[in-house]
Amino acid sequence: MIVGLIQCAKTKKSYPTIAASMYWDSWAFRTGFKILKLRSDKIFIFSDKYGLIEPETMISPYDVNPADLLEEELNILMLSALEKLPADTHEVITIMPMRFVAKLEYLLPINIKVTP
């Protein structure tokens, strides 16, 4: 299975909604999501608060700045995210900041492709 992985966005709705809708007003998120939809079998969103979530997951708005996360907090989020990937994942296509991609490459024994 090819998994698409995208980072959440700073721009969020002000009310609870499904994850994809929460970030949809962000041009970068919307564009990246559409690209991943064409290139992957399943998409996950990496949320700075909720970790790895499916686009249909109901979430509430939050205000977490990834730059404020301690390295240990980020590691915990990333490790918990990796546990949620489907067992038959053989490739991850990602549109995420390089800080996250470097961790993924270190933690995942599978092929990781960065999509521009």
Image: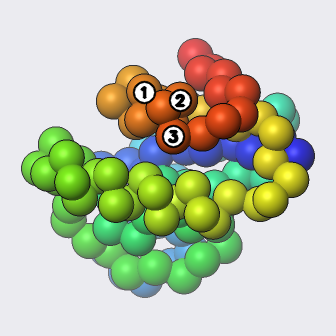
Mark 1, secondary structure of its residue: helix
Is residue 41 visible to the viewer in this orientation of the structure? no
C-alpha distance separating marks 1 and 3: 9 Å
Near-viewer residue (6 or 78): 78
Q: Look at mark 2 in the image and give the residue it sits on.
A: 105
Between discs 1 and 3, the one toward the N terminus: 1
Instruction: Evaluate if marks 2 and 1 touch, with contact meaning CB atoms under 8 Å apart.
Output: yes
Inspect the image, locate mark 3, and give the three-letter code of the amino acid beneath it.
Leu
Instruction: Evaluate if marks 2 and 3 touch, with contact meaning CB atoms under 8 Å apart.
Output: yes
Give percent across and percent down for residue 60.
Answer: 38, 81
Q: Look at mark 3 in the image and give the residue it sits on.
A: 107
Inspect the image, locate mark 2, and give the three-letter code of the amino acid beneath it.
Glu
Near-viewer residue (108 or 74): 108
Work out which residue is located at the far top of the displayed protein and give it: 116
Is residue 61 visible to the viewer in this orientation of the structure? yes
Residue 61: give its label.
none
Mark 2, secondary structure of its residue: helix
For this view, does 36 lie left or right of residue 79? right
Residue drawn at point x = 23 percent, y = 59 percent? 73
Q: Look at mark 1 in the image and give the residue it sits on.
A: 102
Give percent across and percent down for residue 71.
Answer: 19, 46
Residue drawn at point x = 46 percent, y = 79 percent? 59
Residue 47 position by quadrant: bottom left
